[in-house]
Amino acid sequence: MSHLFLVVLMIIGAAAATPLRAQGWDAGKHASGWAFQEVDGSFMFFDPAARSLRTWMKGGGLLASLPVALPADQKSAAAKLSAAPPKVVSDYSAAAATLYGIPNHQRVSSASAKPASQGASATPSQCTAVPERWVLDSYNRVWMVCEGRLAVLGKEGAPVNILPIPGPVEDMAVARDGILLLYRTLKPYLEKRDLKTGALLWTFGDKNEVKEAATEPLRVPINRMALGADDSIYIAEGASLALTVLDPIKGPKDPGQLFFTSRNATSDHAVLGPVGRGPMLSWAGRDVIFGVFTPKQVRSCGAPDSKGLLLARFDLARGTVEWLPTSLDQGHRLVGLLDTEAVFLAPDGGLAYTSIH
């Protein structure tokens, strides 16, 4: 082999090294946290190690990466350190038990929370917290919830707008003309914000719920949200299998109620227990929403016995719910729906799949 040929091989290898490294991130092995699914089936994950949003598709691999840089919020950090202890409550909330079967000890006590380390390596100019939620709008801007703020990120990954929000967000969705935020509260509280400015358009529910959740945070989710094909908003409240339906424009005016039957009988309330309510996602191109429960939660709802999690297939047009057993253990979290598979995040990271129809 000639010396010149060896030099050519070394140049080709050096040129190929960078794209190979860039494509090394695999959601099937490394995905964690929240996930946003686009209508084309691709997913957007946050990679904490690289502080980047990764767009990934099954069968297509890594499609794009966007480094994220958020300014640190020193006032928010100081407020957390000086926050007053929560009010004293009983060991078990009778109201919560009646509605949801949720013991009060499942709530996070801010009095027992440890303050942030004074020796942290975070620089004052950049926030190193892991974002909690994010969606991509029709202008290719990322709306991201992080440490009590709603940041709008431009194409370079830097914020072009930062807005305060009243509390922790449980579910987040993007509609044709706005951003929807469902907060982690005992009773549902939802905001719709303008897609261009982030200004508040309308709210559903009692904002006082957010104040109560701030003093006595919920450890597990109680309420969930999903969008229909026409941008109608479906809210699952507590243990009920019925869904509250909001018009995307009218919002809180004239909310509807959608009930479901299972095996020709009206489905009963679930028993949420210590797990809380699992994610609820709409199936793209179909008038169907999927939810996820443990077998114990929906034993009284006509669900079959299962060794793994159960998917609830809510048919919005027919008003029926069908139960799909899976082999996945508790701890797997529903993050997306493909044409024939539901996508779950595994407890230790990475993805798992189960069939749907």
Image (cartoon, rainbow, N blue to C red):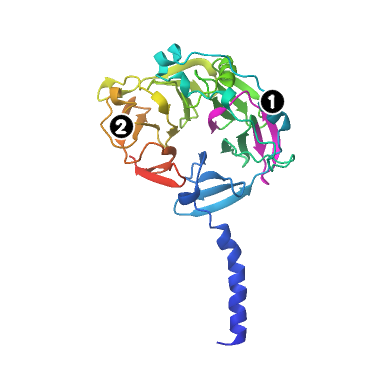
Image quarter hosting the C terminus: top left
Secondary element type, mark 1: helix
Residue 264, which numbered label? none
Q: Position of residue 337 (x, y in %)?
A: 42, 40
Residue 340 in view (yes/no)? no
Left or right: 246 in relation to 14? left
Q: Main secondary structure of the magenta part?
A: strand
Residue 124 placement (x, y as % from top left): 74, 39
Disc 1 designates what residue?
Answer: 79
What amino acid is at disc 1?
Ala
The residue lying furthest to the top in this view is: 94
Contact, mark 1 vs mark 2 (Cβ under 8 Å): no
Q: Residue at x 36, y 20 (%)?
A: 259
The reply, left or right, for residue 316 in relation to residue 89 is left
Residue at (70, 34) in percent of width and height = 161
| Near-viewer residue (221 or 233) | 221
Nearest the camera: 232 or 158?
A: 158
Residue wearing tag 2: 323
Q: Is residue 160 magenta?
A: yes
Structural crowding at the residue carrying mark 2, measured as other residues with C-alpha within 10 Å and reported as few (<14), some (14–19) or many (≥20) = many
Residue type at the position of mark 2: Trp
In terms of image quadrants, where is residue 200?
top right
Sequence-wise, which precedes: disc 1 or disc 2?
A: 1
Residue 165 in picture, x, y percent from top left: 64, 26
Could you classify mark 1 by the number of other residues whose Cα lies within 10 Å: few (under 14), some (14-19), or many (20 or more)? few
Dot in front, 1 or 2: 1
**Mark 2 secondary-structure assignment:** strand
Q: Which residues, given as a range, are shown in magenta?
A: 150-175
Q: Which quarter of the figure has residue 199?
A: top right
Image point (50%, 43%), residue name: 32
Q: Is residue 92 above or below residue 38?
A: above
